[in-house]
Image (tube, rainbow, N blue to C red):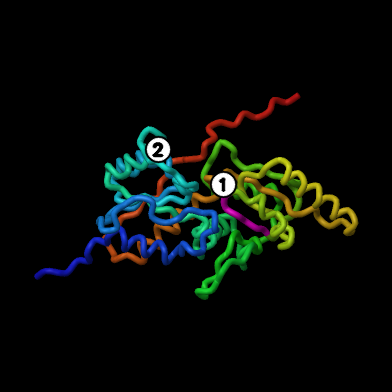
Amino acid sequence: MTTDRPSTPALRDVVAVLEDLYPPGTAESWDAVGLVLGDPATPVRKVLLAVDPVAEVVDEAIAWGADLLVTHHPLFLRAVHSVAATTFKGDVVHRLLTAGCGLYVAHTNADAAPRGVADALADLVGITDRRPLVAGDDADGVERGIGRVGRLAEPTTLRAFAEHVAAVLPATAQGVRVAGDPEAQVATAAVVGGSGDSLFDAVRAAAVDVYVTADLRHHPASELRERAAFEARGTGGAAATPYLVDVAHFASEWPWLRYAAEDLLARLPEGTVTTRVSTTGTDPWTLRVASAAR
């Protein structure tokens, strides 16, 4: 007696699932998402998911025998006129093609999606009753948008909250930086995976106690904190919020990979594809030296 086994999906089938989860049309206009490399007819049995399409991740994909590498960050964000292997990005292209491994990118469309980058980060840091920080297009009846904002499970101190964030995110040389009184109480929070200081106005409008994001620059962060302190002066002792929790870019987006792996498998025929979340750290910083006491 024989039983019919589901056929191995082709790359085009896997792409169709990814584009249902993360519609390319919901990406920002400047973004570059979708299938970068690969023959749509190629069978896909192994999918590796990673934040960055860098050489070390390509090594991992090839060593594992991946048929498809799905990354959050694009390999090419600007137009190119050559993919010769004489450049570091051209070398990535040639090595993947030689190994028979495709490349697919889900970037800002994955940021905004349900169970995308923002939801994964919000789940880890413990935000409930949440909504998008910046609402997106929900023409398909699905709530999308950049970032998430909501309540913490219970009020805590800024210090304890930051320690929790550090504990649940991947370890990086930067660790977690905090701006604000460490003993201040926080009960509401906003998160944005990746670089988030362009959304300070939305965070202020949301009136949250603390904002978790990455890549905070000196001047925007300083001005936000100065403005918060100034506006709190005439409010009878109100807290100078929002406080800031700055994490590494890579660490803020890596949690999404597990959701993407789970959701991809759930929509493909059972037993046909194996997924793996890369644990290769692609944060570019390798060492932090604390300032000496003076």
**Amino acid on which disc 2 is placed:** Ala
User: Around disc 2, counting alpha carbons within 10 Å, would you say few (fewer than 14), some (14 to 19), or many (20 or more)?
Assistant: some
Per the model, the C-alpha gap separating discs 1 and 2 is 28 Å
Residue 197 screen position, x and y as percent: 66, 50
Q: Earlier in the sequence, mark 1 or mark 2?
A: 2
Which residue shows up at 27% across the image and 42% down it? 98
Q: Which mark is residue 55?
A: 2
Residue beneath label 1, please?
Answer: 167
Which residue shows up at 88% across the image and 53% down it? 233
Q: How many marks?
A: 2
Horizontal relation, residue 174 to residue 230: left or right: left
- In this view of the protein, which residue sits in the foreground, 130 or 17? 17
Main SS category, magenta section: strand
The stretch of residues the image draws in magenta is 189-194
Which residue shows up at 19% across the image and 66% down it? 5
Horizontal relation, residue 71 to residue 188: left or right: left
Element at label 2: helix
Horizontal relation, residue 61 to residue 105: left or right: left
